[in-house]
Amino acid sequence: MEHSEIDPHATVEERDFEAALRPKTLAEFDGQPRVREQLGLVLDAARHRGTAPDHVLLSGPPGLGKTTLAMIIAAELGAGLRISSGPAIQHAGDLAAILSGLDEGDVLFLDEIHRLARPAEEMLYLAMEDFRVDVIVGKGPGATAIPIDLPPFTLVGATTRAGMLPGPLRDRFGFTAQLDFYEADDLAGIVGGSARKLAVALDDAARVEIARRSRGTPRIANRLLRRVRDFAQVRGHAVADLGVARGALELYEVDERGLDRLDRAVLDALTRLFDGGPVGLSTLALSVGEEIETVSEVAEPFLIREGLLVRTPRGRVATRAAYAHLGLRPPAAAIQSLFGDG
């Protein structure tokens, strides 16, 4: 009943850990009840018809289970699974090679599908609709298009940026699911199930504490569980109780709201260096020594969701809640200009 998602930056040990916790069926998949029910209907209907299901688009922030759901779709159908990603397919020929290697009923999972190269994207349109690709042989006026028929297959696309997906591609998916951040109760269940699989003695209070600091994300919950397990083993604690969990999370700089070192560095720069803002993203990233993409894609979404940071046309601004979380008092000028009197 616990799941995670492939992290492209994870070590071999971390990927093995994630694989051990990944559910194999929809019944084992905790959280996302609406998506689970809708997807179950799509798969059941396809099985009754004896056909491949409609193509599936999964969108949402990283770590919520998009890769896991793609694997579950293949397992539920008893089909083969091929995995690739948008950045890995730079040419139409790369995609043609993948598509021509599919067997009937296979599931093709394309992660970060919004980053697919334009020539490959146009080839995918035909493959999704007519199960055919046209391979161009030769160059210039003598080039010839050779049609290659494909067996029926199901494409599962995943994206963290649904808005960047071209309309013609998005419209070719028969079922679209938006994955949301998880409630703390669902995460607590995931942490408890993961602990049982890993034979980690974890009491209820520790389980809830890990879930509460996991930013609504199963991948992070399982990662924090691993750190609490290490802390308990090294410090000689037979049971990871609330004190052990808090000690481990404090050591690894994850505070009571789930903010980590980068999150606090962003808020600290905003409040202490720039008087609450507004400040441009590039300047903010430079001030914390990180890449712009890291700040905008890793830290900002969570800080905005927590009400600690807002985006404005003039730049990023720290909220009153950010000052309160850091134990600071907003400057009077900032209160008047950014938040209004009173």
Image (spheres, helix red, strand yellow):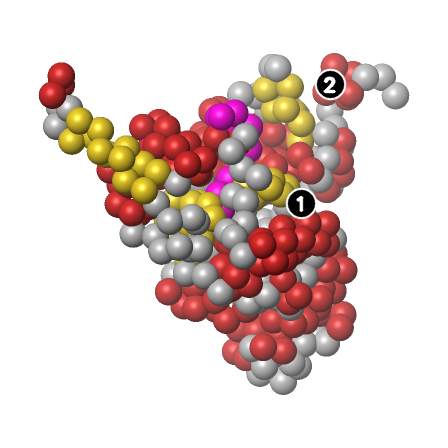
Residue, disc 2: 338
Q: Position of residue 248 (x, y in %)?
A: 60, 66
- Magenta residues? 156-168
Q: Is residue 74 at all visible to an observer of this figure?
A: yes
Against 9, residue 112 (above or below) is above
Against 105, residue 123 (above or below) is above
Query: In the image, is residue 163 part of the stretch drawn in magenta?
Result: yes
**Quadrant placement of the N terminus:** bottom right
Quadrant for residue 113, please give it. Answer: top left
Cα distance, mark 2 to mark 1? Answer: 30 Å
Rendered residue at 27%/35% (across/down): 147
Around disc 2, counting alpha carbons within 10 Å, would you say few (fewer than 14), some (14 to 19), or many (20 or more)? some
Please state which amino acid type lies under the numbered disc 1: Asp
Viewer-closest of 228 and 39:
39
Against 154, residue 228 (above or below) is below
Q: Position of residue 240 (x, y in %)?
A: 66, 76
What secondary structure is marked by label 1?
A: loop
Q: Is residue 232 at all visible to an observer of this figure?
A: no
Q: Position of residue 278 (x, y in %)?
A: 62, 20
Quadrant for residue 305, please give it. Answer: top right
Please state which amino acid type lies under the numbered disc 2: Leu
Q: Position of residue 337 (x, y in %)?
A: 74, 14
Rendered residue at 67%/61% (across/down): 30
Q: Which mark is residue 180?
A: 1
Viewer-closest of 168 and 182:
168
Rendered residue at 29%/47% (across/down): 100
In the picture provided, is 96 more to the left or to the right than 48?
Answer: left
What secondary structure is marked by label 2?
A: helix
In the picture provided, is 108 more to the left or to the right than 49?
Answer: left
Against 33, residue 110 (above or below) is above
